């Protein structure tokens, strides 16, 4: 059996701030079509999607309808779990959510806290907020999970809410394959024939994803092997507004410098607003920094 592994899709209509697409929905829809085509050409039994299927519970109905139509015509079964973006108020209830509608329309299968058995392959779902339980019994065991999993250590200073690939191998030895969502960076780790696969995000939505390459993996349950396939994407210069990102970075640096200046004893006093304006006048901050400060004070 072959299974296609993917990452966080964050299906939506509105384009992210840094994208240049005239029609972001069409671009993203095309990527999902591409994934389905890859799965069908490789005779995959399932597509495993590890949560954050949608970007918001307020996804427009026509977007939901478009994907229902697409998946109904697919030859491959999509299995998924809910991520926090799929859940209203970050509760674990999928009722009255776009993902719940997709499930009710029988266009995909939600396997949260559920075991699916097929030809000696056991697929266990562990959505956002669920507790991971080690696999028991014979067969090949796959965990589809939505939790911040990193390749080695924290991705930024102070990050604590994560688990490393090494920890997964050590704490849950009953699983042969971990398919992870939540971390938008791509990585794969291997240990004695067992794998942790984190495909990352389907789309390059933020400026820190300049080097991100959207990928899928195909897992062969008979050979217990992985094949990495890169999706066809346009040049980063055509999809991300690099000039806007640079301008925002300069603006943030100026704001940080101004805030740092407020910490000096000369700016301390009883009237915060008065002191703030005096500090802006004395330091000669740029107009954009002044406008940001005034917007916060409104």
Image (tube, rainbow, N blue to C red):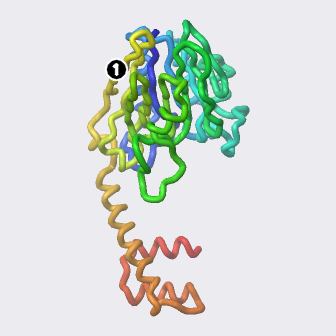
How many marks the image carries: the answer is: 1
Residue at image coords 61%, 33%: 132
State the image quarter where residue 280 is shown: bottom left
Q: Looking at the picture, does residue 294 appear above or below residue 50?
A: below
Residue 258 x %, y %: 41, 78
Q: Nearer the viewer, residue 278 or 199?
A: 199
- Check disc 1: other Cα within 10 Å, few if <14, some if 14-19, many if 20+: few
Residue 1 x %, y %: 46, 9
Label 1: element kind: strand
Q: Looking at the picture, does residue 122 appear above or below residue 32?
A: above
Q: Is residue 60 visible?
A: no
Q: Nearer the viewer, residue 106 or 64?
A: 106
Residue 174 x %, y %: 54, 24
Q: Looking at the picture, does residue 171 appear above or below residue 76?
A: below
State the image quarter where residue 150 is shown: top left
Find disc 1 in the rendering and name its residue.
Answer: 227
Q: Nearer the viewer, residue 61 or 174?
A: 174
Residue at image coords 54%, 35%: 171
Which residue reaches farthest top? 119
Q: Is residue 125 visible?
A: yes
Q: Nearer the viewer, residue 144 or 51?
A: 144
Identify the image quadrant of the C terminus.
bottom right
Say whether residue 72 is left or right of residue 292: right
Residue 64 x %, y %: 59, 28
Residue at image coords 45%, 13%: 221
Q: Looking at the picture, does residue 71 appear above or below residue 15?
A: above
């Amino acid at each position: 059996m072959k299974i296609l592994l993917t990452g966080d899709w964050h299906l939506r209509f509105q384009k992210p701030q840094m994208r240049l697409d005239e029609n972001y929905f069409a671009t993203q829809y095309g990527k999902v079509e591409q994934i389905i085509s890859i799965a069908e050409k490789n005779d995959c039994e399932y597509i495993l999607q590890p949560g954050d299927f949608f970007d918001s519970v307020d996804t427009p109905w026509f977007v939901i309808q478009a994907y229902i139509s697409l998946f109904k015509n697919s030859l491959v079964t999509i299995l998924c779990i809910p991520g926090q973006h799929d859940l209203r108020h970050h509760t674990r209830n999928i009722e009255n959510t776009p993902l719940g509608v997709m499930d009710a329309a029988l266009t995909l299968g939600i396997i949260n806290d559920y075991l699916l058995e097929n030809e000696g392959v056991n697929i266990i779902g562990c959505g956002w907020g669920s507790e991971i339980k080690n696999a028991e019994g014979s067969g090949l065991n796959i965990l589809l999970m939505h939790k911040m999993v990193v390749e080695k250590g924290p991705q930024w200073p102070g990050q604590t809410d994560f688990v490393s690939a090494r920890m997964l191998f050590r704490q849950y030895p009953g699983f042969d394959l971990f398919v992870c969502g939540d971390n938008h960076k791509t990585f794969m780790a291997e240990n004695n024939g067992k794998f942790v696969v984190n495909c990352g995000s389907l789309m390059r939505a933020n400026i820190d994803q300049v080097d991100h390459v959207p990928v899928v993996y195909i897992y062969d349950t008979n050979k217990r092997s992985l094949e990495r396939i890169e999706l066809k994407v346009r040049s980063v210069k055509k999809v991300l507004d690099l000039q806007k990102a640079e301008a925002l970075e300069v603006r943030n640096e100026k704001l940080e410098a101004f805030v740092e200046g407020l910490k000096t004893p000369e700016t301390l006093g009883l009237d915060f607003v008065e002191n703030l304006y005096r500090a802006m006048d004395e330091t000669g901050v740029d107009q954009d920094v002044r406008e940001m400060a005034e917007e916060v004070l409104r």
